[in-house]
Amino acid sequence: MITFADKAIAFFKSLRFHAPLPKSVQVMNPYQDKTTFEIVETFFRKFYADTSPRIFLWGINPGRFGGGVTGIPFTDPFALTTFLGIEHSLSGKRELSSEFVYAVIEQWGGAKKFYGTFYINSLSPLGFTRLGKNYNFYDDAQLFAITKPFIVQSISAQLNFGAIRNTAISLGTGKLYDIFSKLNDEHEFFERIVPLEHPRFIMQYRRKQQRQFVEKYLATLKEAIG
């Protein structure tokens, strides 16, 4: 029996970005680091060792302090230990998006229950930096043109893990949602895409309303299941 975990591990193990990038832009690929990949494999074996399909949630691309370090989307080193129970030797500080996502996961009933129903990644499963800072693939028209084939190929490959295709969640209501919607119109990945405010936007600009946004996330996830 080939599980969701088996397919995901094989995907991330082979993940590479070969296209030449614009000047000063670099790609982050934590999956090429042996220690990080062992963490990734542990994560998938722990939470996805079955063949059940999941509802997919999609962010932009990994950042330097979350998935760019741990290899697990929206998961910083603190969350890795505290909420996933995975011991590690990684260093790093709390990351705002991870902080919000795991507030949602805890309210859902914890990681086992959440990941038993949902799968999170980003449209670009590899992140980018420019001059040492996070750089989204859509921040530069040239970069988006270069990364678009990689993004389409990566989404298509991940659908084969076991995706519920009637609904996907966009972790962003603005530019990410617009781009995801256009890609979906072109390639028919999902029947519909439901947008939610990006976790970092909430924590950086709407932190006083964090509880209300957690409730909004929970309601949207429940509706996606229904």
Image (tube, helix red, strand yellow):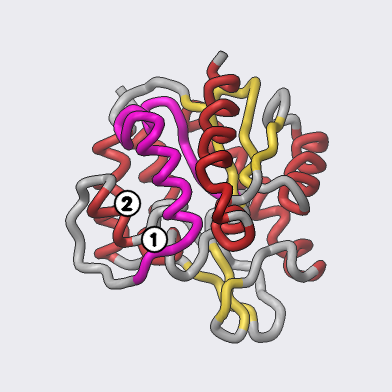
The amino acid type found where label 1 is placed reads: Tyr
Looking at the image, which is closer to me, 222 or 38?
222
Q: Work out whether 139 lies above or below 2.
A: below
Which residue lies at the image location 51% right of the left edge and 30% below the top edge? 218
The disc, 1 or 2, on the residue closer to the chain's N-terminal end is 1
Q: Is 117 situated left or right of 178 in this image?
A: left
What crowding class fits label 1: few (fewer than 14 Cα within 10 Å), some (14-19), or many (20 or more)? many
Say what secondary structure mark 2 lies in.
helix
Looking at the image, which is closer to me, 129 or 22?
129
The amino acid type found where label 2 is placed reads: Val
From the image, tell me which residue sits under label 1: 31
Which residue lies at the image location 61% right of the left edge and 55% below the top edge? 206
Which residue lies at the image location 26% right of the left edge and 38% below the top edge? 45
Magenta run includes residue 100: yes
Task: Tell me, yes or no, whether the two marked residues, 1 and 2, touch with CB atoms within 8 Å.
Answer: yes
From the image, tell me which residue sits under label 2: 40
Residue 195 appears in view:
yes
Segment tinted magenta in the rendering? 93-122
Residue 6 appears in view:
no
Q: Is 219 situated left or right of 34 in this image?
A: right
